[in-house]
Image: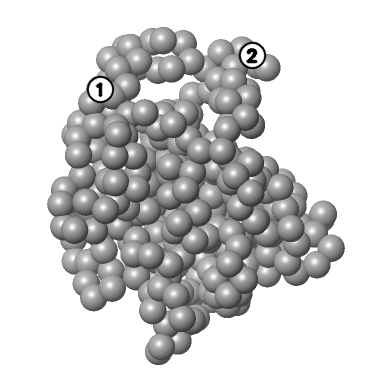
């Protein structure tokens, strides 16, 4: 592997099953791999001792949706902000994203390396299960969930297949750092508070001509029941279907090749990343004051 790889693990859970990720990744890393792990952890201030050589452990960068600088009454889901935090800490090369409560199945890292060699964005497969038991990074047992199977698998005729932007799911993917920077990062302004930032990223990347491929071998297993073991951060698709926020947001993304992300300021994500890599601190966001779809002040949410 000639290029540098950053693996981003983002969580807002007190019990994210981080050991599943560590153990399964450790089984796949080779001595000459050039890898940095970035843990974007809402509980970083109370979960100590994780940072170290090639391991960066930080809270999400300041946002109006959650944490100490929030404008909302409570903490809201803000995955795009967390993903952009990791992007700003990633050196040049590739960045991979992995969901919490997940274990990397054998061969996952090899699939990422294949994408790095082929210079494409790779969308990995997943399977959501119950009662997942992991021993030293290996799946020992689980209970099947009929609706927990990756719907993209049935359409994949080969191990690696070209795919549309709608096939980009955030649970497991990797791509060039430059590809994410070229579309101005993950859509914080559009999706934080709601979610679906992964589909929007895929659609806009496809609009921009960035090649995307689905690799059915790049598999993660995820424990679905553990999603409800803690009270999740609030998220809402405002409005009435189909005239709701998610459809309005997708209408916007389908027509653009990069996200405005106006709240990031004139530096945009590329400029912020340059400052962070020089050792500076993340700027404190003060915008937006209102939720864009309904115009509701964030102070009322």
Residue lying at 45% horizontally and 56% vertically, measured from the top left: 178
- 138 or 236, nearer to the observer: 236
Residue at image mark 1: 71
Q: How far across and how far down the image is residue 177, in percent? A: 44, 58
Q: Quadrant of residue 255?
A: top right
Whether residue 130 sits left or right of residue 52 in the image: it is: right
For marks 1 and 2, the one nearer the N-term is 1
- 101 or 246, nearer to the observer: 246
Q: Is residue 214 above or below residue 52?
A: above
Query: What separation in Å lies between label 1 and label 2 (alpha carbons)?
Result: 26 Å
Whether residue 112 sits left or right of residue 47 in the image: it is: right
Q: Quadrant of residue 215?
A: bottom right
Residue at image mark 2: 243
Q: Secondary structure at mark 1?
A: loop
Q: Secondary structure at mark 2?
A: strand
Q: How far across and how far down the image is residue 269, in percent? A: 35, 44
Residue lying at 23% horizontally and 26% vertically, measured from the top left: 286
Q: Is residue 133 above or below residue 3?
A: above
Q: Is residue 208 above or below residue 103?
A: above
């Amino acid at each position: 592997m000639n290029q540098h790889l950053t693996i981003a693990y983002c969580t807002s859970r007190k019990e994210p099953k981080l050991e599943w990720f560590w153990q399964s990744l450790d089984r796949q890393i080779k001595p000459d791999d050039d890898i940095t792990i970035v843990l974007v952890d809402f509980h970083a201030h109370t979960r100590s001792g994780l940072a170290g050589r090639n391991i960066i452990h930080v809270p999400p960068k300041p946002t109006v949706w959650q944490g100490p600088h929030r404008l909302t009454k409570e903490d809201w889901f803000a995955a795009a902000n967390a993903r952009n935090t990791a992007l700003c800490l990633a050196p040049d090369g590739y960045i991979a994203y992995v969901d919490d409560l997940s274990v990397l199945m054998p061969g996952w890292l090899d699939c990422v390396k294949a994408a790095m060699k082929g210079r494409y964005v790779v969308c990995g497969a997943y399977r959501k299960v119950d009662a997942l038991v992991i021993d030293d990074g290996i799946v020992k047992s689980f209970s099947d969930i009929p609706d927990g199977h990756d719907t993209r698998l049935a359409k994949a005729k080969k191990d690696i297949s070209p795919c549309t932007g709608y096939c980009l799911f955030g649970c497991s993917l990797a791509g060039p750092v430059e590809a994410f920077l070229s579309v101005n990062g993950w859509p914080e302004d559009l999706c934080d508070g709601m979610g679906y930032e992964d589909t929007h990223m895929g659609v806009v990347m496809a609009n921009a001509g960035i090649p995307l491929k689905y690799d059915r071998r790049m598999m993660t297993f995820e424990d679905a029941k553990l999603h409800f073991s803690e009270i999740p951060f609030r998220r809402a698709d405002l409005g009435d279907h189909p005239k709701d926020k998610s459809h309005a947001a997708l209408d916007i993304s389908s027509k653009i090749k990069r996200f405005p992300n106006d709240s990031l300021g004139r530096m945009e994500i590329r400029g912020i990343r340059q400052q962070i890599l020089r050792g500076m601190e993340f700027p404190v966001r003060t915008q937006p004051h209102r939720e864009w779809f309904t115009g509701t002040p964030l102070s009322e949410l």
